[in-house]
Amino acid sequence: MSVTRPTAAWAGLLAPDPETESFWAGARQHKFLVRHCNACGRSHFYPRHACPHCWSDNCEWRPVSGHGRVFSYTVIHHNEHPLFRERVPYIVALVDLVEGVRVTANLVECTPEVVHVGLPVEVVYEQVGEELTVPQFRPIRR
């Protein structure tokens, strides 16, 4: 489905800040980055300065495979925001990456009838304007 997406509106919704700029820079290069804590050895997502497990600020960005499985999902049937109205129904999923990090993202190239818990997925990238690339997930094609 082709949807017109005003770049300024998307940028307003997904504006990088100092905590997330590296994540968005990685996405522009088609790399899915997560924060890794060098103190406790655990990775985390959503990007933030301190580790949510041990509160250390000794964290760095690391690329991950972008492969995982759907942990849970919801199908959105109604959204009046202009950027999403034409996409309904769409799927928002919790994805457990093989590296042990859980992320929230849209599930694309998949219908509500096909999605299920445990569905193997991989990251894909949607270019929105010149500066914004949005990582999403799709079922792995076999």
Image (cartoon, rainbow, N blue to C red):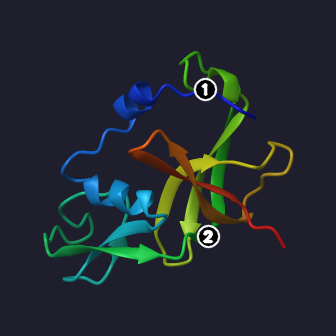
Q: Secondary structure at mark 2?
A: strand
> Is residue 75 left or right of 110 when viewed as pictured?
left
Q: CA distance from mark 1 to mark 2?
A: 29 Å
**Relative to residue 106, is residue 102 depicted above or below?**
below
* Eye-nearest disc, 1 or 2: 1
Assign the N terminus to one quadrant of the image.
top right
**Relative to residue 28, is residue 17 depicted above or below?**
above
> Is residue 10 left or right of 94 when viewed as pictured?
left
Q: Amino acid at mark 2?
A: Gly
Point out residue 58 in the picture as x, y percentages from the top left corner.
14, 76
Toward the left, the furthest residue is: 57
Q: Which mark is residue 4?
A: 1
Residue shown at the point (44%, 32%) measured from the top left: 10
Assign the C terminus to one quadrant of the image.
bottom right
Splitting the image into 4 quarters, where does residue 46 fall? bottom left
Residue corresponding to mark 2: 68
How packed is label 1: few (under 14 Cα within 10 Å), some, or many (20 or more)?
A: few
How packed is label 2: few (under 14 Cα within 10 Å), some, or many (20 or more)?
A: many
Dot 1 or dot 2, earlier in sequence = 1
Residue shown at the point (55%, 28%) measured from the top left: 5
The residue nearer to you, when weighing 3 against 93, is 3
Point out residue 141 in the picture as x, y percentages from the top left corner.
80, 68
**Relative to residue 111, is residue 33 depicted above or below?**
below
**Relative to residue 44, is residue 64 depicted above or below?**
below
Q: Amino acid at mark 1?
A: Thr
Toward the front, the furthest residue is: 130
